[in-house]
Image: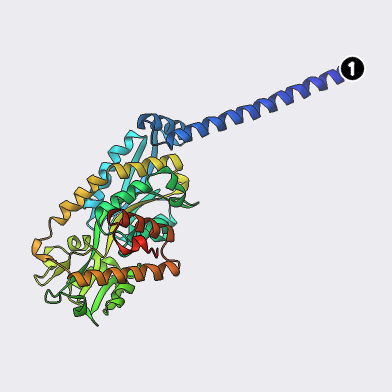
Amino acid sequence: MKAKTLLASIFGLLFLSSAVFADTSGDLESRRNSKLEATVMNPNLPLEKRIRALKKLQVDEMVGGRILRTFCVWDPLGKAGPISSTVDDQKLRSLHYGMDLTVITFQDEVELLDALRTDDRCDAALIRGSVAMEFNKFAGTIEAIGGMRQREQVHLLMQVLANPRMASRLTDDKYTVLGVATMGASYRFTSDRSKRSLADFKNQLMAVESIDPSRSEFVSAIGANPANGSMMSNVQSYADGKVKGMISPIIAYLVMGTGQISRDVGIFDTPVAQSTIQLIGHTEKFPPGLAQILREDFLFKFDNYARRVDNEMALIPGEFWMKDTKSDVQKMEQIALDVRLKLREEGYYDPAMLRLQRKIRCKFEPARSECTNPKE
């Protein structure tokens, strides 16, 4: 009996020791990972140190020392287009922080969105901000009508979004926003240069994207009749003369090609909204540290993206640009505010993003009435 009791005690001690060791080991690993995550998420530390910590966290995901990911890209001009070529630059930069990217280019935006939603081809997709609303309302609201008046405001907004404290607004259980870049702005196009005021478009057909209700609301408010469609179908309707005007990102001009553009065409130089391109990824593929590094990288390259936009816009002959009257600009600002408030109340626009945009507008123009009497 004494031998059995002694043996049981020994086994009991061994079991207790192994349990304590397992708990201690697990606790040590948890503390180690927490420290590594804190390092990766700290933008004040040297980038190289953060990347080393990221690679240690992602070691189980690596193949041959690289994290393999596939980015899908929408570019209506194909692999040689400006958006697709930008991602080629990203491939080289991504190697620096341990990612080996495969890029798939889609000319059909609907096909790309379906691929992001339903199959495993796309770990992340580079899409227009106007269609990003489905994946993150906070980031989708960046393109709120009249929300950002100029590129400098967009740049400041990107600096705010790259702060790690904003990560929770940019991520949910399914999708995470990995970066935002400027794609110019959306403008009002006219097919008749003699129509120079908002009043001239009363009862006229104006093409707008069906995916974004703010454009229809805006067009209706100026007295025109919205003709809803996709960006590409709107461009074709406009080029074929089926509508008198359209609201579209400036990339529409490049899609049309000079062969489809009449000398009667005009583009009003008051932006209706800023246009962005956003990288949306599956959260499970991009843990917080990796997502944060990517967002900061987009900010770092903001000026580079902006120069690309400028190069493309330089292809638009100067005579196509038209100026709005001061009274029309003021009227459009009031209409845009009314639309934003309406869509905020309907739950379409994110209130936090609208507030952030107002604060940024007021930083640049503190004398604006909305700075002392805010409605957003």
- For disc 1, the marked residue is 2
Judge whether 125 appears above or below 223 on screen.
above
Where disc 1 sits, the SS reads helix
Q: Which quadrant of the structure image shows residue 131?
A: bottom left
- Locate residue 20, reporting x and y percent: 68, 26
**Residue 240 appears at what percent x and percent y?**
17, 74
Quadrant that contains the C terminus: bottom left
Q: Residue, x 35% and y 71% (percent of image)?
A: 338
Residue 281 to residue 147: above or below: above
Which residue lies most toward the bottom here? 203
Observer-nearest of 210 and 31: 31
Near mark 1 (Cα within 10 A), the count class, few <14, some 14-19 or many ≥20, is few
Q: Could you tell me if residue 60 is visible in this image?
A: no
**Horizontal relation, residue 256 to residue 283: left or right:** left
Question: Is 101 displayed left or right of 256 in the figure?
Answer: right
Q: Residue at x 39, y 31 (%)?
A: 45
The part of the image, by quadrant, that contains residue 194 is bottom left
**Residue 205: image x %, image y %?**
24, 79
- Can residue 193 be spotted in the picture? yes
Q: Amino acid at mark 1?
A: Lys
Quarter residue 246 falls in: bottom left
- Viewer-side residue, 201 vs 241: 201
The answer to whether residue 26 is left or right of residue 63 is right
User: Residue 198, relative to residue 154: is it above or below?
Assistant: below
Q: Position of residue 36 (x, y in %)?
A: 48, 32
**Which residue shows up at 25% across the image and 54% down it?**
151
Q: Residue at x 43, y 48 (%)?
A: 166
* Colour treatment of the image: rainbow
Q: Quadrant of the N terminus?
A: top right
Q: Nearer the viewer, residue 167 or 368?
A: 368
